[in-house]
Image (cartoon, rainbow, N blue to C red):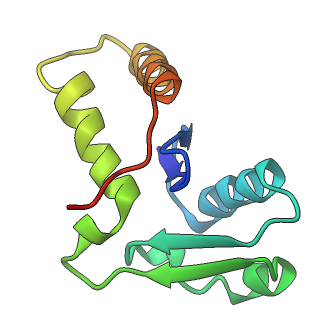
Amino acid sequence: MFAALEVATGKIIATHSKRRRRVEFLDFMNSLTAAFPNRQLHVNLDNLNTHKKNEDWLKAHRNVKFHFAPTSASWLNQVEVWFSILQGQSLSGTSFTSLKQLREHIDAYVNAYNDKAQPFVWT
């Protein structure tokens, strides 16, 4: 699963992928740039290897800037905070009989979450 959190609204954009290679990551990034045309995008990332060595893609998408969180500081990346919310509020204690069922469950949660989404307030 790839996900992005729109900081201004608190809404989640998510997609499922069988793998998490660079090609799937860049496909997700292409969908984000299409969802926010003509906008400057600042993308906070962890240090997953697929997030690195994407200079050619970034050259073709000058409106996108990647920012990497320090190792062991995932709490600085708000989508990682959301992944924790997803785990605690939706996935913990559940079981699924198929990957399709899991995806449908996550999609339903994302839709319900987005209906009430608000930006995170740091205290």
20 to 110, vertically: above or below: below
1 to 33, vertically: above or below: above
Of residues 104 and 33, the one nearer the viewer is 33
Is residue 103 something that shows in the picture? yes
Q: Quadrant of the C terminus?
A: bottom left
Residue 99 image position (x, y, % from top left)? 42, 22
Residue 53 image position (x, y, % from top left)? 59, 87
Residue 115 image position (x, y, % from top left)? 52, 22
Of residues 72 and 52, the one nearer the viewer is 72
Residue 109 image position (x, y, % from top left)? 41, 21
**Would you say 84 lies left or right of 44 here?**
left
Count up the numbered dots: 0
**Residue at the spot 54% in from the left edge and 45% down from the top edge:** 9
**Residue at the spot 86% in from the left edge and 80% down from the top edge:** 60
Is residue 17 something that shows in the picture? no
**Residue at the spot 52% in from the left edge and 74% down from the top edge:** 51
Of residues 79 and 52, the one nearer the viewer is 79
76 to 70, vertically: above or below: above
**Residue at the spot 65% in from the left edge and 81% down from the top edge:** 65
Q: Which residue, as the protein is rendered here, is positioned at the far left?
A: 93
